[in-house]
Image (cartoon, grey):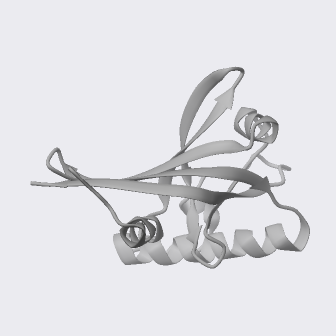
Amino acid sequence: MEDLSTKECIELLGNNYIGRIAYILKGSPEIVPITYFFDPENNSIISYSGKGGKIEAMRQNSSVSFQVDEISNVVHWKSVLIHGEYEELEGLTAKHLLHKFSEGVKKLVHEKEKTNPKFIREFSSKIKKNGIPIVYRINIKEVFGRQRES
C-alpha cells in the first residue's frame, strides 16, 4: 500500500459522487452512504438531506469524517478519508449550492454511466413530500488517501 498525494485525493473526490459520511449519534459512531459533489472552489463536499437523525447529530457535533473508495478488486483500490466540519446552508447560498450539486452529479453520472439524468430524484435520495431539503457542506480540514496496486 502507498499514500496518495493531496492532488490524487482531490482527483478521486472529484471523479465520484457516492461516499460515506461518519458522525456521532447518541454517543455512537454512525456511517451512511450519501450522494455528494466535490466543490473544488470551496474545498468542500456538498450534499443535502431531509430532517432526521443524521442532520440532528451533525448539528450537535459538527466534526465529521467522509470516505470515498474506488475498488476494482482486492489488490487494486484507492480510498480517501476526509476530516471536516459540517456547515448547514440557508437561503440563496443553499439554493446555489444545491444547483451546483445537481449539475455536477448529473455530469458525473453521464460520464460514468452514459445516462442523462434530468432530476435529482434520478440519482439521489428523495425528500418526503412537503419536505424542504437541508443543504449542507463538509468543509475539509484534512484529507488522506491510500492505494493498493499489485
Instruction: Give 102 or 2, whichever is nearer the viewer.
Output: 2
Check the image and name the residue furthest to the left.
Answer: 150
Instruction: Give 46 or 86, whichever is nearer the viewer.
Output: 86
- Quadrant for the C terminus, please: bottom left
State whether residue 3 is above or below residue 111.
above
Query: Image check: 18 left or right of 128?
Result: left
Q: Residue 31's image quarter?
A: top right
Where is residue 15 shown, x and y percent of the image? 41, 70
Please give the name of the residue rendered at 16% of the width and 44% of the height, measured from the top-left corner. 74
Please give the name of the residue rendered at 88% of the width and 62% of the height, measured from the top-left corner. 90
Check the image and name the residue furthest to the right.
Answer: 91
Asked whether residue 139 is in view, the answer is yes
Instruction: Give 121 or 106, whichever is nearer the viewer.
Output: 106
Where is residue 136 shown, x and y percent of the image? 74, 57
Where is residue 98 shown, x and y percent of the image? 72, 68
State whether residue 81 is above or below residue 16.
above
State whether residue 137 is above or below residue 32.
below
Where is residue 10 shown, x and y percent of the image? 45, 69
State whether residue 121 is above or below residue 50.
below
Query: Image check: 109 left or right of 118?
Result: left
Instruction: Give 84 or 91, whichever is nearer the viewer.
Output: 84
